[in-house]
Amino acid sequence: MAVTVIEVRNLVKKYGSFAAVDGISFEVMKGEVFSLLGPNGAGKTTTVEIMECLRTLTSGEVRILGMDVNKETLKIKGRIGVLPQDFNAFDFLTVKENIEYFGGMFNKSLPADDLIRAVDLGEKRDVWFKKLSGGLKQRVGVAISMVNDPDIIFLDEPTTGLDPKARRDVWAVIQELKAKGKTVILTTHYMEEAEVLSDRVGIIDHGRFLALGTPHDIIEQFGTGSRCIISNCDDACAQSLKQQWPGIERKGGDIVIKLENKGSLPEIIYTLDRSGGNYEQIQVTRPTLEDVFLRLTGKKLHEEEAPPPTEKKGLFGRKKKEKGVA
Ligand SMILES: Nc1ncnc2c1ncn2[C@@H]1O[C@H](COP(=O)(O)OP(=O)(O)OP(=O)(O)O)[C@@H](O)[C@H]1O
Ligand SMILES: [Mg+2]
């Protein structure tokens, strides 16, 4: 049976009169990967840091493993793991020494070598933290977040600023955590990351949820449906298609048809064959979380892949000074 490990009810966090988190509610079940997905300033870090007992809430209720964040702070901290946004460790300690240092803060900790193996850093065990690439540093951060063998692990933007390969390596580590039955709370700017890793996603902007559910359900609910694109379509093809689907869109030489049901595609192919015209290829596209986000917020979103080494670039192009990740 599903066990609820996080309960957030009508959470509000105000800084002065500004509501950074504006009345959100959600639950997370044991073993889930739950992602908060949203642009810079959406309220992701504020929300997770309240769950981590690092910030106080203005109103509402937050319970972690059944415990109230206002009352059982120390107990909660012992049972969660945290990779903060802009994580950093000691430059002149090795990977192993850093993990052991953080392990020493808890009554009980897992052996550093086991954690090093879990994040696949065996070859870097005795290398200074300073000498590691951004992706490897983040993997040290994930290892440190696991040092007290927590039930819930919070990873605040674990892949921001990493190149595609390093990002996917961190994904593999997160998938391993899930396979071990850990509950993972992830914050991210990256649509694809949320879609690939998460059981459920909360799309957040201006401190409120715009959508909450499995990536599949969100796409079903808010997506625009699948589309068929026929590229380099000549006039004969276009005319025949238009007779049957008056609402088709023309984009340059391409034709775009919204697929109403499974039967539409064979009908389109049949119509094209009968038209006697020419076309290059037929493609079917399914909406993504990114399309949903654009539709809900009207904001243009781009997923940059390899930012320059000394800065992070946010979802909407705002540049963030990088602290911990090189
Ligand atoms: N200590 C603070 N005092 C005043 N305002 C704050 C404070 N911390 C955060 N804010 C504001 O609250 C809003 C939410 O910030 P938060 O850091 O939670 O967003 P975020 O979604 O994590 O953004 P990012 O993707 O940039 O990390 C922002 O407008 C931010 O400027
Ligand atoms: Mg943040």
Image (cartoon, helix red, strand yellow):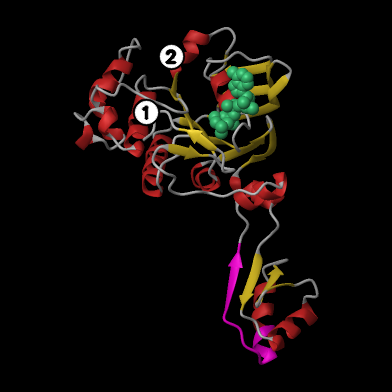
Which residue is at a point 35% across and 38% down the rendered structure image? Answer: 135
Q: Is residue 238 above or below residue 155?
A: below
- State which quarter of the image contains the C terminus: top left
Residue in view at x 24 percent, y 25 percent: 96
Task: Residue 93: give x, y in percent of width and height.
Answer: 24, 22
User: Any magenta on residue 183?
Assistant: no
Q: Where is residue 45, by image quadrant?
A: top right
Write down the quadrant of residue 46 in the picture. top right
Q: Residue at position x 23%, y 25% from top?
A: 94
Q: Is residue 79 visible?
A: yes
Q: Which mark is in front, 2 or 1?
A: 1
Residue 230 is situated, as x and y percent measured from the top left of the image, at 63, 76
Residue type at mark 2: give it.
Answer: Gly
Give percent across and percent down for residue 92.
Answer: 25, 22
In the image, residue 24 above or below residue 178? above
Q: Report crowding for label 1: few under 14, some 14 to 19, many 20 or more residues within 10 A (C-alpha).
A: many
Would you say residue 1 is visible in this rendering?
A: no
Q: Quadrant of the N terminus?
A: top right
Could you tell me which residue is drawn at 29 percent across and 28 percent down? Answer: 115
The magenta stretch spans which residues? 271-285
Above or below, 243 against 19 in this view is below
Query: Can you tell me which quadrant of the image ligand 2 is in?
Result: top right
Q: Check residue 78 in the rendering and tell me which mark sits there, or answer none.
A: 2
Q: Is residue 276 magenta?
A: yes
Residue neighbourhood size for the residue with mark 2, other residues' Cα within 10 Å, grouped as few (<14), some (14–19), many (≥20): some
In this rendered view, identify the residue nearer to me: 46 or 258: 46
Q: Amino acid at mark 1?
A: Gly
Q: Residue tagged by mark 1?
A: 141
In space, the residues marked 2 and 1 are separated at their CA atoms by 17 Å
